[in-house]
Image (cartoon, rainbow, N blue to C red):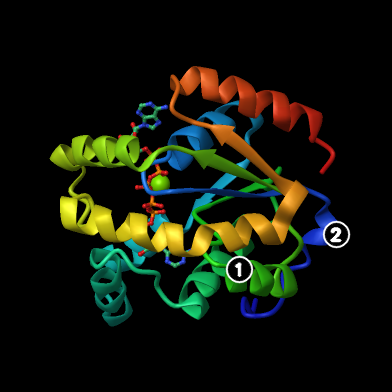
């Protein structure tokens, strides 16, 4: 089946939730907990990109250079990977958690035009200092090319230069969650919100 065309997700009436926040804000950690409880499909654009890098393809080599600089990869490339992943899970998914997307307003516009409307956004709000500390700690063992001081600075800069327009664009659809607490405490707030919006 061709994957470049719009995916008819509207017909399935399942939630499609964008999960956003700075580098190390806890997107992946909270998504894992949501998956455990709600059985949604977790699609992290960072993970999809790293899978492509690990495949050793020419495209992967280009992507890795961009990620190592802490910059955004091209919209077309990331959206294509996302569409392919959605397509793979379409028949069985109870809902999609789209982690790390959108990173700029244009990504949101293109997704909603070519795939479907998002139900709402979860935004994990954490200070730069805390995110840096978490990532440096993780960097000791993660093996990620971007978990180093220089790239973390650049990732934070990239995040700050694009995030506010996304929040403005989606307005009331954004659920901002203070995320400098214990993971379980944050998750409780996530659950309360998800339970109240299950029909989205
Ligand atoms: P991506 O892989 O998405 O990285 P990121 O956004 O920088 O965020 P992380 O995955 O590092 O952190 P996270 O928020 O998931 O936090 P986590 O739960 O892991 O993207 C990587 C790169 O790919 C980008 O820089 C870009 O180049 C490219 N890219 C990706 N998406 C793109 C897109 N849409 N468009 C263009 N380019 C794109 O937690 C981090 C650490 O903190 C862990 O060790 C965890 O255990 C710990 N932790 C989590 N929560 C807590 C807590 N509450 N208290 C204490 N520690 C905690
Ligand atoms: Mg992540």
Task: Tell me which residue sits at (56%, 24%) in the image.
Answer: 187
Residue closer to the observer: 16 or 83? 16
Q: Position of residue 83 (x, y in %)?
A: 59, 68
Dot 1 corresponds to which residue?
A: 105
Q: Position of residue 199 (x, y in %)?
A: 84, 39
Name the mark on residue 11. 2
Q: Position of residue 81 (x, y in %)?
A: 50, 69
Residue 176 location, quadrant: top right
Is 188 located above or below residue 106 in the figure?
above
Front disc: 2 or 1: 1
Determine if residue 6 is in view. yes
Q: Is residue 57 left or right of residue 1?
A: left
Task: Tell me which residue sits at (53%, 24%) in the image.
Answer: 186
Is 32 located above or below residue 106 in the figure?
above
Which quarter shows the N terminus?
bottom right
Task: Tell me which residue sits at (56%, 61%) in the image.
Answer: 102
| Inter-mark Cα distance, 2 to 1 | 25 Å
Q: Is residue 180 left or right of residue 9?
A: left
């Amino acid at each position: 089946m061709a994957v470049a065309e719009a995916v008819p997700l509207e017909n399935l009436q399942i939630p499609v939730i964008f999960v956003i926040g700075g580098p190390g804000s806890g997107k992946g950690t909270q998504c894992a907990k949501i998956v455990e409880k709600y059985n949604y499909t977790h699609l992290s654009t960072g993970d999809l990109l790293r899978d492509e890098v690990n495949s050793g393809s020419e495209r992967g080599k280009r992507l890795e250079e961009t990620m190592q600089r802490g910059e955004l990869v091209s919209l077309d490339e990331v959206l294509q990977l996302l569409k392919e992943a959605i397509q793979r899970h379409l028949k069985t998914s109870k809902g999609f958690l789209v982690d790390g997307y959108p990173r700029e307003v244009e990504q949101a516009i293109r997704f909603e035009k070519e795939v479907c409307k998002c139900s709402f956004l979860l935004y994990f709000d954490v200070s730069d200092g805390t995110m840096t500390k978490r990532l440096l700690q993780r960097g000791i063992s993660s093996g990620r090319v971007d978990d180093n001081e220089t790239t973390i600075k650049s990732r934070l800069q990239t995040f700050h230069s694009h995030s506010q327009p996304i929040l403005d664009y989606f307005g009331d659809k954004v659920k901002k969650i203070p995320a400098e607490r214990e993971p379980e405490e944050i998750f409780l707030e996530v659950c309360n919100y998800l339970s109240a919006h299950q029909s989205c």
